[in-house]
Image (tube, rainbow, N blue to C red):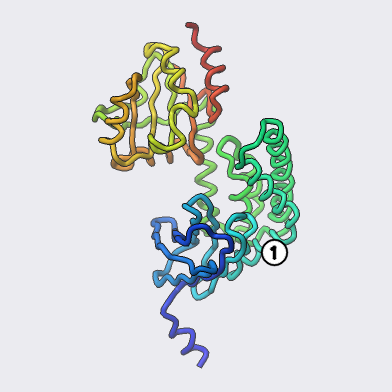
Amino acid sequence: MLCLAACSKDYTYRIEGKLSHLTEPTVYAVFENEQEKKVDTLLCADNGTFELEEQIDGFHSVTLFFEGRSRWVTAYLEPGTTVSIEGDAQSPLLLQVKGGKINDRLAAFKKKQADLFNEMSTLTQQLGEKANTVEQTDAAARLADVNLRLSEEAAAYVKAHPDEEASVVLIQTFFADPDDTRKIDELLALLDPRLNDFYLVRELEQFSIRSQRIALEAEAPDFTVKNIYGKSMSLDSFANRYLLLAFTAPWCDMCQTEDLSLDEVAMRYSTDQLAILLVSLDDQPASVRESVAKDSIPWNVVTDSAGQAMQLIDLYNVSVLPRCFLIDEEKRIIMKTDNEVEIRQTLERLIAE
């Protein structure tokens, strides 16, 4: 009878839960494995409850995006297991995710470090609110300290539980730094060899390889792309000058050129000294061409037409936007940053006006 009951399920994965203090009922569920993604849309009830069933097998995780996709939470999937997600939608770091070995282990870790996670959630919300510079500076410093303490606890967990898949998730969560993979490499080396086939182990190993590929002083990975005017270009197209390769969000989004003061940079240096190539996630080159035509600066833009931007994002291991790489005349990466001050100061030091 138990076998018949189990075999009668018409779903492979089931996610249910309750999100309190939702201001928008729409939730986007992104199911993922190493080869594909599947997106479902669901509406929460007035009290924030929801249910979702997925019949297709082979997915590793599901990420729920809510509150206008500004907040999210990830759950790890096991066939036939129901995952529950509950808590305050305005504090996604504190959401309780249970159901399945990985989720339950991570929930236990979060419960043990509840004070730190509560403090992290509070400080993150403070930084997202309008505040004076002194308050923001203090909150940022305290948040950095909390992150450090949590990363130390995560590393201790990995060392104590090298045979758990949850340990791999903690490595990804706390140590996936594209500018320094030493901690990832150190902790991966401690894992039980039986985890070598776990998909996140493979992803972290590839992440480390890509990060080393774009290390400072490394030769910049070459590429061949077409800009919004159909002109083909590679690193050789910018020979004998510096190249500022800038990855941005969609052209009309908040993460545009002014966020990095690139307009000031473009006007300050001649194109014989410095070239700027913008990589934008826009998938409508015609719209970008129209916007660029209204600008006084002739921007050189590559969009995500035919997946070009995503190829470059993967090639340069970009995990946050905006992100800039400064490449010298010898095709070496000499700066990686998202800080406009660092961009300006580095160029002032390198290029004589």
Amino acid type at image mark 1: Ala
Front-most of residues 338 and 311: 338
Seen at 49% across and 61% down, the residue is 62
Q: Position of residue 75 (x, y in %)?
A: 54, 62
Give the mark count: 1
Q: Quadrant of residue 295?
A: top left
| Residue 233 in sight | yes
Seen at 38% across and 26% down, the residue is 277
Residue positioned most to the top:
353
Q: Are there few (<14), some (14-19), or many (20+) residues within 10 Å of tag 1?
A: some
Seen at 53% across and 30% down, the residue is 338
Q: Position of residue 345 (x, y in %)?
A: 56, 17
Q: Position of residue 83 (x, y in %)?
A: 55, 70
Q: Is residue 245 above or below residue 97?
A: above
Q: Is residue 50 above or below residue 353?
A: below
Secondary structure under badge 1? helix
Q: Quadrant of residue 74?
A: bottom right
Front-most of residues 73 and 190: 73
Residue positioned most to the bottom:
1
| Residue 330 in sight | no
Residue that label 1 marks = 108
Q: Is residue 44 above or below residue 142?
A: below
Q: Position of residue 54 (x, y in %)?
A: 42, 70
Seen at 37% across and 38% down, the residue is 309
Q: Quadrant of residue 134?
A: top right
